[in-house]
């Protein structure tokens, strides 16, 4: 089934640069969609007035919850799924909007299909023959969509949404730990001065997954759990602080041979006092 048969494909009405204002209703261009989600952006580069927005809303249409946007020029194919009520408008021909989905269509499933290699290959094929390297509504409307029963669509969308949510949580935790590493001050044994943790420590992760654990008693295998597992080999052999940054955030100190899960930070330094462990532990309660 083709895209044009399961939803309405639109672009926006023309907004001139002279209509931009300093604040009010965000006006989105392709640049914002490149890395843009409704969850994180508070400041946009362009805005239009409420009067102009209401005029367009009453006479034509505006994006609404569950719609999908795709970039049509420059960086082609970036997607934005509108997962909440949010007043904004977008630049004509920079972006193309998918809306008014037929019954039996889960928009979130369609969003994930549009992120797939099958969808991207069809775009690339159409662009080969295009005079101008840009997506058009006609081009997108002819793209074939794999459309299982609605129950299967719902399951696929639910599973992939949970994965995306976990990735987002992990990214927030990584950002928090990066801030932590840049903000924790440690006392240097050599000259009794204070310095940043990132400037005097080796901070790294390893690549083992949870299946690396065995029943062997030789070496500890630190994961995100409070309790260490066991494994057959070791990659670290010194005094380390271990910071689990996925799931149950916790901080440990260990002084011997061990191995580590891929989502565990290891911090090594010979010149810091042991109270860094406690500093990290108490700061951990503010990471969320």
Image: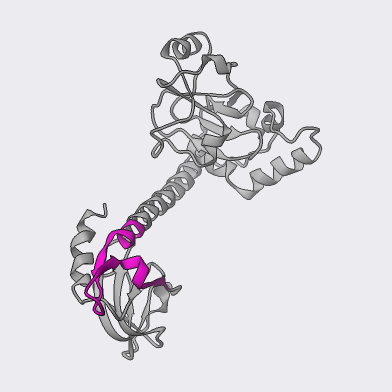
Image height of 170 relative to 85, above or below: below
- Residue at 71% over, 31% down: 139
Residue 110 visible in the displayed image:
no
Q: Which quadrant of the structure image shows residue 29?
A: top right
Is residue 93 shown left or right of residue 263? right
Quarter containing the N terminus: top right
The magenta stretch spans residue 244: no
Question: Residue at point 55% right, 32% down?
Answer: 69
In front of the other: 99 or 199: 199
Q: Is residue 212 in sight in this rendering?
A: yes
Q: Is residue 214 above or below residue 173?
A: below
Q: Quadrant of residue 209?
A: bottom left
Image quadrant in which you'd find residue 208: bottom left
Residue appearing at x 45%, y 31% in the figure: 44
Residues shaded magenta = 178-205
Question: How many numbered discs?
Answer: 0
Query: Is residue 192 located in the magenta-colored stretch of the structure?
Result: yes
Residue 253 in the image, given as x and y percentages of width and height? 24, 77
* Residue 63 image offset from top left, x and y in percent: 49, 24
Residue 50: image location, x then y, percent:
42, 14
Q: Is residue 62 above or below residue 233?
A: above
* Visual colour scheme: one colour
Image height of 272 relative to 170, above or below: below
Residue 195 % position (x, y)? 29, 67
Name which residue lies at 31% across and 67% down.
197
In the picture as drawn, the residue positioned furthest to the front comes out as: 191
């Amino acid at each position: 089934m083709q895209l044009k048969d399961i939803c309405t494909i639109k672009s926006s009405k023309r907004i001139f640069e002279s209509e931009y204002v300093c604040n009010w209703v965000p006006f989105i261009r392709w640049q914002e969609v490149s890395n843009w989600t409704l969850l994180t952006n508070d400041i946009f580069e362009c805005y239009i007035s409420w009067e102009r927005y209401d005029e367009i809303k009453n006479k034509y249409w505006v994006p609404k919850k569950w719609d999908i946007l795709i970039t049509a020029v420059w960086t082609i194919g970036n997607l934005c799924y509108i997962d909440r009520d949010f007043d904004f408008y977008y630049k004509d021909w920079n972006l193309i909007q998918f809306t008014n989905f037929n019954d039996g269509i889960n928009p979130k499933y369609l969003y994930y299909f549009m992120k797939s290699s099958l969808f991207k290959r069809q775009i690339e094929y159409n662009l080969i023959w295009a005079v101008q390297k840009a997506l058009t509504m006609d081009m997108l409307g002819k793209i074939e969509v794999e459309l299982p029963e609605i129950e299967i669509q719902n399951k696929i969308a639910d599973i992939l949404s949970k994965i995306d949510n976990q990735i987002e949580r992990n990214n927030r935790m990584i950002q928090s730990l990066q801030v932590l590493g840049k903000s924790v001050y440690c006392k240097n044994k050599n000259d009794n001065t204070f310095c940043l943790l990132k400037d005097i420590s080796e901070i790294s992760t390893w690549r083992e997954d949870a299946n690396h654990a065995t029943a062997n008693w030789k070496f500890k295998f630190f994961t995100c759990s409070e309790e260490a597992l066991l494994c057959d080999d070791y990659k670290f052999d010194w005094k380390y602080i271990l910071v689990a940054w996925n799931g149950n955030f916790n901080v440990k100190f260990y002084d011997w041979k061990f191995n580590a899960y891929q989502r565990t930070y290891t911090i090594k330094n010979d010149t810091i006092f042991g109270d860094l462990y406690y500093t990290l532990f108490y700061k951990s309660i503010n990471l969320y």
